[in-house]
Image (cartoon, helix red, strand yellow):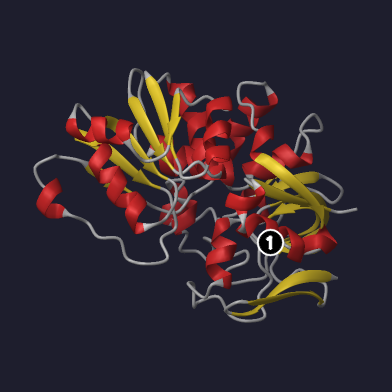
Amino acid sequence: MRALVYRGPGESCWDEIPDPVIEEATDAIVRVDTTTVCGSDLHILAGELPEVEPGTVLGHEAVGAVTEVGSEVHSVRPGEQVIVSCVSACGHCSYCRENAYGQCRGGGGWLLGNSINGTQAELVRVPFADLSTHRCPGALTRQDAVLLAEVLPTAYEVGVRNGQVSPGDTVVVVGAGPIGLAAIITARLFSPRRTIAVDLSPSRLEAATRLGADFAELPGRMISDLAEGPGADVVIEAVGAPESFVLCTRAVRPGGHIANIGMHGQPATLHLEALWRKNITISTGQVDTFSIPWLLDLVVSGRLHISELVTHSFVLDQMEEAYDVFSRGADTGALKVALHRE
C-alpha cells in the first residue's frame, strides 16, 4: 500500500510500504476512504514531538471500511463503514473506566500516527477496535464523518466541557482554525450570551461569523475592553502559541475558566504575579473521544452543522499537496483538508 511516511524533522514522503496485518486479537484493519491533515501532524514534521520515530506513517483521523478483524473484536464486522477515533482505548484500565481514554494505561492513548502507523495511508491497523471505531451511518457524508474522529470531540471535550460553558456566559475563542470553529459550534449547544472569535486571519474571522460567533475580530479593542471590564466567563485557547495563551489570561474574568486546547510546541509563560488573585481555573489535556457517539447523533439529526469546516479536498495520492495547502492556511484559506480514496 501507499502511505505518508515521516522520515525525520522536515521530511516525509508518499511511499510504498507493506500492508498492515492483525497483530492483536483486538485489532481491526480498515481501508481508509477519507483522512485528514491535522495541526499536530505539522508539529511532528517540525520535529517538536521527538518521540515519533522516523518511518512512522502519520495521521490519526479516518473513515473507512473494515476489511478484517481480530478474534476478540465484537462491535464491528468486515464490510462496515466506521469512524476511526484518534484515540485508542483498552476499555479495562482505571482511566478507561472513567472515559478518560486519552490517558489509557492498558496500551492505548494516542497511538495512531504517533507510536504506531497512522491513517494517512490506504490501510490502517486500529488497536482496540471495539472502543476505537464507531459505525458510520449511511446518511452521513465521509467528509462530515471524519470530523468526528478528532476535531469535534476535541473542541467539545477539551474546550467547551472543560471550560464549563454555561447558559448566559460570555465565551471567547482565541484561534478560528478548525478546532476553534468547532468550539464555537459546540458552545452554542449551551446557550452562551455571546461568543467572540479572535484570529489574525480575516477569512477565518468571516468563517467564525458564518458558523455562529456573535463577534469576530483581530486581537484588539474588544479584548482590551474585556481585560479592563468584566472579562469573559470562558476563554478557549485554540492556537497553541505563547502569545495566544497570554491573550486568554488577559480576557478571562475573575473566577472564570481558561480551557487550553492548542498543542504548544514551546513553553508558554504563566504570569502568576498577575493571575494569583483572579481565582481562575486553567484546564488542558488530551481528547478522550468519549463524546463521539453523542456528537454523531447531533450531527445526523441536524443539530450540529459542520460541513463548512472542510474547505479543501484531495485524493490520497495528493497527500504532499494537501500538506502544503494546509500548512499555508493563512494564504490558501484552508481550514480542514480532507483526502479521499479515488
Q: Is residue 290 visible?
A: no
Name the secondary structure under disc 1. Answer: helix
Q: Left or right: 238 with respect to 308?
A: left
Amino acid type, mark 1: Tyr
Q: Is residue 291 above or below residue 328?
A: above
Viewer-proximal residue among 92 and 300: 300
Residue 138 percent location from the top left of the image: 82, 33
- Classify residue 15 by image quadrant: bottom right
Please rate how many residues cluster around mark 1, counting C-alpha atoms within 10 Å: few if below 14, some from 14 to 19, many from 20: some
* Residue at position x 52%, y 24% in the image: 212
Which residue bears the numbered disc 1? 323
Residue 85 percent location from the top left of the image: 63, 50
Q: Left or right: 323 with respect to 182?
A: right
Q: Left or right: 165 with respect to 184?
A: left
Viewer-proximal residue among 124 and 43: 43
Q: Is residue 76 above or below residue 203?
A: below
Residue 18 percent location from the top left of the image: 82, 77
* Residue at position x 39%, y 57% in the image: 241
Q: Is residue 190 visible?
A: yes
Q: Is residue 243 above or below residue 114?
A: above
Viewer-proximal residue among 204 and 123: 204
* Residue at position x 53%, y 39% in the image: 202
Give the quarter of the figure containing the N terminus: bottom right
Q: How many marks?
A: 1
Residue 260 percent location from the top left of the image: 37, 48
Q: Left or right: 91 with respect to 271?
A: right
